[in-house]
Image (cartoon, rainbow, N blue to C red):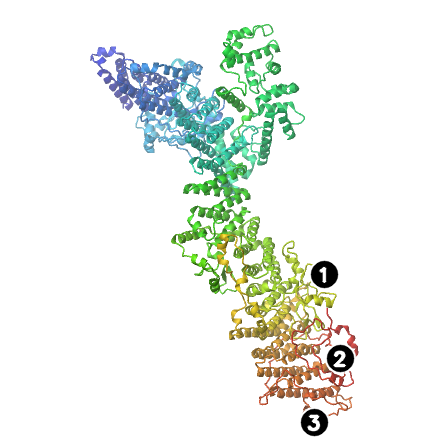
Amino acid sequence: MVDKNIYIVQGEICTVVSAIKRNSRWNTHTPLDEEQDPLLNSFSHLKEILNNIKELSDVEPNIFLRPFLEVVRSEDTTGPITGLALTSVNKFLSYGLIDANHEAAAEAIENMADAVTHARFVGTDPASDEVVLMKILQVLRTLLLTPVGAHLTNESVCEIMQSCFRICFEMRLSELLRKSAEHTLVDMVQLLFSRLPQFKEEAKSFVGANMKKIPLCILDTQDLICPEQPKNTNQRGLERVLHTNHFYWLLLKMRAGGMSESSKWKKQKRSPRPPRHMVRSATGGLDQPTLSNNNLSGGVPFIEQGSLSVSDSVASSMSSPTDSGLETCSKATSREDLTDLDQSSSASTTPGMAPSPSTEPGHLDSQTEGRPVERAQSASVESIPEVLEDRDSVAEQSDSASVHDMDYVNPRGVRFTPQQTQRDGAALVPYGLPCLRELFRFLISLTNPHDRHNTDAMMHMGLQLLTVALEAAHIAPYQSLLCLVKDELCRHLFQLLTVDRLNLYAASLRACFLLFESMREHLKFQLEMYLKKLMDIITSENLKMPYEMKEMALEALVQLLRIPSFVTELYINHDCDFYCSNLFEDLTKLLSKNAFPVSGQLYTTHLLSLEALLTVIDSTEAHCQAKVLNNTAQQDQSTETMLAEGVDLTSDSTETTTGIVCFSQMLDILIIIVGCDHVFSFFSAEKKEIKIPQRFSCCLPDSQELLEIRNRKKLLNSGTEQFNQKPKKGIQFLQEKGLLSSPMDNNEVAQWLRENPRLDKKQIGEFISDRRHMELLDSFVNTFTFQGLRIDEALRLYLEAFRLPGEAPVIHRLLETFTDTWHKVNGSPFMTNDAGFALAYAVIMLNTDQHNHNVRKQNIPMTVEQFKKNLKGVNGNTDFDQDMLEDIYNAIKNEEIVMPDEQSGLVKENYVWSVLLHRGATPEGIFLHVPAGVYDHDLFTMTWGPTIAALSYVFDKSLDDNIIQKAIAGFRKCAMISAHYGFSDVFDNLIISLCKFTTLSSESVENLPTVFGSNMKAQIAAKTVFHLAHRHGDILREGWKNIMDSMLQLFRAELLPKAMVEVEDFVEPNGKISLQREETPSNRGESAVLSFVNWLTLSGAEQSGLRGPTTENQEAKQAAVLCIKQCDPEKLITESKFLQLESLQELMKALISVTPDEETYDEEDAAFCLEMLLRIVMENRDRVSCVWQTVRDHLYHLCVQATESCFLVERAVVGLIRLAIRLLRREDISSQVLLSLRLLLMMKPHVLARVSREVAYGLHELLKTNAANIHSADDWFTLFSLIECIGAGMKPPASFQVTSTSPDMDTGAQSDSELSSHHPSEVSLDRGYTSDSEVYTEHGKSRMPRSVTDVDVANSGWLVVGKDDLDINKLSGSKPLVNPLVNQYSLTLGQDMGFHDTKSLIKCVESLSFIVRDAAHVTPENFELCVKAIRVFVEASLNGGYRTHEKKKNHKYDSQKSRVRRKPRDKEMASRRSKTSSQRPSRSHSDDEEDEGVPASYHTVSLQVSQDLLDLMHTLHTRAASIYSSWAEEQRHLEDAGKKIEADSQTLWTSCWCPLLQGIAWLCCDARRQVRMQALTYLQRALLVHDLQTLDAVEWESCFNKVLFPLLTKLLDNISPADVGGMEETRMRACTLLSKVFLQHLSPLLSLPTFAALWLTILDFMDKYMHAGSSDLLLEAIPESLKNMLLVMDTAGIFHNADSRTGYSDLWEITWERIDCFLPNLREELFKQTVIPQPGLTLAPPVAPSPLAAPPPAQMPSPVPAVPTEPKTPSRPASPQDPPTPNMSPQISTPMNQSPMNQSPLILQPLASHLQVGGVPPMSLPIILNPALIEASSPVPLLPAPRITDPSDTPEVK
């Protein structure tokens, strides 16, 4: 079957031939004519050849191309015919008819290129001629871009490019054609530079191993599709075009400087080729030494997984547009098409074996396998994986192959395989680096603005193509190209920045970006110059400069700053280099300044400046985020995996820099995880050795090192400035600072003069030429390397380093030193040193002659002949080498030796540029590549200030939402970074700035809701502030104050969520109270109770001014409320538990600082802050010990130092108790918290009284929730003291009332430990009563810290509270008695009760009963305190607490005074105060209902209290024995018990039973009948309870003395005048009880020595009670009781005594003596037989009834009530053995000096008030008997005398 390709060629032949024949020249039809015509002849030959073959590949490409190319070359053909031939050639190329692997392909291609670039044709008209030119372009494009194009030589490529440039720059051609040429050029440049990695630089191994890898060049060479591509040539027209001067120049220019190369190429063209090394696989097929990583469907990269060789071109070319034409075809079709193309184009040399076109790729492979033919594998998709597998081995084996032997697969997946030509044994060398270098050089030359030939269009074209070249290839590794970049390219680009044509300016900016993005490590000083130029443009004040230029410069900056790690590198390479500008710092300053508009109007430049600043922030923030994520998520595994990947990646990396750019993130993370050393194993993998600048100790110096370098740089700069004014001064300064050694080291100074570019060259010249510094001059000259330099070159270098002074001797000295050195290092080339000196001088003269304008005006410049003549015989009497002199002359003539600081304009520019290049070549030019993010900390430190300032300004001035959002994003990022690095000052600054924008603090409270609600910007700022505080609160310090001020404003404006202004309260029924008063219709006013008062006090003006709010205002307020809700301010409190301690302390400090003052804050503000503080403390329960002291001091300040009660004090008190309730569960702090409750006892009594109800309710809550957590006696003491003070109005224990007289102590409050020291350790002293032996004792020993005399007390800074105390002190002498004494023989505690609040009393009693009723809560530590407290309440509640009403009225205080009025500070404050003007009361607890008499409801309440108390006492009384014995039992198990607990009856009696009985007895004296009766019942039960039976005689005696007798005494008073009958009954029951108890315990009582006194006292009471009543009740009951007792005693034989004369004892006589006084007939009734005469004694008349009792009404019935019998409760018996009786009852003192006869019996008067102890002598007794009776008793003394002296029994005051 015939090859289809043959038909294609035949078809083209027909087309061209028929066209030729149609032409008038060839209109004959004879065969002869055809043969004679060379063109037609060659076609007919070709036809014959084609007819004889089956495969097109059987003939050489040249054979079927030649006829067509002849038509193209022929000058006689017309345009259309030439056009047809060109179309055919294009078709052959694009169909792939020329097999790239054919040995003759190279020659065919070369011919084709030659023919097309030299096409000739006869012109017809311009339009059709342009069509031909278009076709020429098309063929050239196709030729270069198809696989066979790889065979073109360097020269052909240059010619092709040249032809395109010609068309491009020929202005007479149509624009369409010129543009097509431009597109073609773009495609060609793209292809050529994308092939750059294939080429090797001769003699230098820069590319080394990289050559073996195919890069992923993802350039879409828009290969086969070229939309509009014109071509040119008509005979006359083209001749004309080609021979204009312009193109002649262009051609020359293209070849200039490339001549040597092109001549080389000609020689190379036919040079024999080195043998080609083939790599054969086992099957005998050929393994390709390269692989394609690209998909075959147009231009889209196909990257195999795992193949990671990366080059920079990947990144840079991503943006080039893909080839739309080819992208549309599916993979399948593209594969088949390509396979076909590949098959058809690869002509086999063995004709018979050619596969048919239809063969599938698989078949093709199977056929080719095992065939020893050098043939390319099909570049189908299937072939790629195979190649991938063998990659490594292939690379190794093909090392020896030269670059040009490699196959090249272009980005379209088409393989270029070099072909060998067998002819003449010569080979055509395919193009390589030389043509690229030439093209690059030419493009650079097009951009030179100083070349007058370059038009704007040409410069633009040059820039455009350079951009393509830079995008397509990574140029840095090619030294020959890099040199061009460093010098000409950079220079031209920088010069173009000053032109005012925006398109050129923009294009040069773009090219600069590409340069510095990929090659900045080679362009350190160029980068510095570029940035300075940009900065000059941005800050330029020149009005002519277009605004767009500034804008574009800023955009260029932003783009640069966005390059990863660019900023970091700028910082480390420039800011941290002694002799470079502080680029980063200067940029930051410039940008921040530029972000502030001068006019106030925001333009794009301002926003761009801000954006540039933010790019730094953005990248830093991204790095911080990455670190955070990395640290948290995968610390361990990341280390392993990254290191593993790192190794792979680096081994695969294509370029030195790529690795660093691509892996900067990874390095960053690695640095964090692994540290520097490992990171630099990365670098070493990529670059054999890293050059480190001398100033650094390692590749990544730490921040400290950089800081030192920067400080040193500052000193160097000031030293430099001083040197430029006066060299000596500068050197001296640097020596002082230690930067130069002292004394002066010449080498060091010389080095400094050489390397510091900022030094004034003139000053250097003067300094080194000074006679005194001869040695320095030698050192200076030695710093140059003159070796191998011609003398003029060396001199040029030397004279550029300083300004040559004008004086001849100085010049002589400088030149002499120079020539000596030069001569020496170059091996003395001249006869003498002087010859060198003369020549050097001559060079300077020549330079002046040639270039000095003044000299040139006068003389014609010297010629070379004159120059040579002048130097005749100077070289030691011989001549210098003439060629050398000629070279020197030309060098000087062509380029002036520039004297520094002298020239201007272009000459100066050239000089500056050459200095820059010199510096770049020294070690100073080393540019460190560092991973991004390494120095973020330092960079942020430098940028945050300007950035936040700029952000604030833009946020403030801008109205555009996007910009506002951008600013807020900037704020957030700054916050994140500062939090990450712990910069609290930055964060505070940021918060403070944002707080200003919320307008919260600046706006008045009245307008705030409306203003804030309608200001979107303020709302955004507020949300941001709160968001940042929530997120990064840890880092906040000073900023808390601003946030809290904003919160206060929100509070005042009532914008806070309800939950924040509602606080816990104990008294309110719902447990909450609002810190803000309710709105009332009249005014933003108080609670409903006070609305009337407010209405009265309101000024009319204010009322009239209050109109309803408008809907707008309401909407605004709703918006404000919603916004604040989203801010979630409450989260600040709830999340405070996660704050770092330091931040928490600052937050608390901010809250504590809010205290009411005249100016800023009022009481409500302080209360609100206090509440927040308390909530924060509660949130931080876990670490409360750290902050407790601060909080306690604050509360101390609020409570103790308050002089009058107010809302704030109330909240502080409630707060303290709330804290205690919450914190008591925490063991570590509970004791401190309880101690702090003593603050309440230290408050001024009247202030405490006002808040008593809160405290009472709070304490109740506290005990209910935490009683089990209170263990120590001290803590119970505190609590009970509080309960007593609050509920019963007792004075606080004096120890708590000591406060400092000086206004402030060290802490402003006593520490808890100080307080606790006042509390004695012995609890027994605090029980409020004493054992019998201590009849009187001061309550609680010395409570003072030390024993002091009264004078000390008065002056020691302690206040002793209580008016009478100092007097007592003076009386008692040795020790101050701070408490009133307790009289045990009185039922009262004898303590001074203040006023109490009924509700508080009730609540306190509830608390007490809670403790008592739960056995678990009664402990040895609190038992006695409990008992005492109950007694205190008994006293307080007596008579329903009536006595509190005496002064009740004054106690009620009006609400007006409850809060201090303040002077408003200004209008705003006045309006703020409007709601507080009629100040809110702290709730007054003198209940209103108590004022109008005493309503019934009150009685029931007080009654209930008394009944509760009775019940409590009874409960305790009955359970006491069991409780005590269980404690004793428990203690037996614990070895190390502190205080021994005894459960014997004596202990029980003194500490429990006796006080309780006294308490019950006291209630028997209540004015209310119910209470009395109930109390008597309880007393009876209590006295007859089984447990008490174990008491011994002494204790029973004290029961009479302490309980019953005082009770009877009290009952004689007129307690309840309104209830006479009730009182009678009470007295009767009391007497009955007395006799019952007496009789029940008669036997033990008989053992007492004082029995007689006891009995007589009982009789005494009987007497009094007989006459006390007004009815017959007592008159009947008393005799009955008495009879009963007498009979029992008689029966017991107590009255009998066998020894006496009558048989009766003395007692019998005394008894009747006493009874006869009031019941004279009783004896006869009972004992008729025993009446004993009493000689010498007249009986006293009956005692008149007590004046208090009314005469008894006769008709009153008086039945004796039956006393209820008490069932014996089984209870635990007391300990069996009775304890010894230590205390006897007290002496009975009688006034002996009075005559007994005339004295009427002393009747015990009821005590008018508590027993007054103050001035009474301590021996007095509560019960005084009738002295006459005692006196008249028998001679046997009742009281044995010796006992008087017994010290144990004398009552004493301790």
Q: Which of the marked residues, 3 or 1, is nearer the chain's N terminus?
A: 1
Mark 2 → mark 1, Cα distance in angstroms: 40 Å
Looking at the figure, which quarter contains the N terminus? top left
- The residue identified by callout 3 is 1728
Q: Which label is found at residue 1791?
A: 2
Is label 2 or label 3 in front? 2
Q: Which of the marked residues, 2 or 3, is nearer the chain's N terminus?
A: 3
The secondary element bearing badge 1 is classed as helix
Q: Position of residue 22 (x, y in %)?
A: 22, 16
Mark 3 → mark 1, Cα distance in angstroms: 71 Å
Q: Which label is found at residue 103?
A: none
Q: Quadrant of residue 174?
A: top left
Q: Quadrant of residue 87?
A: top left
Q: Identify the amino acid type marked 2.
A: Pro
The secondary element bearing badge 3 is classed as loop
Q: Position of residue 969 (x, y in %)?
A: 46, 42
The secondary element bearing badge 2 is classed as loop
1502 w.r.t. 1255: above or below: below
Q: Position of residue 1342 (x, y in %)?
A: 70, 64
Density class for disc 3 (Cα within 10 Å; few <14, some 14-19, many ≥20) is: few
- The residue identified by callout 1 is 1352
The answer to whether residue 654 of the structure is visible from this angle is no
Q: Identify the amino acid type marked 1.
A: Asp
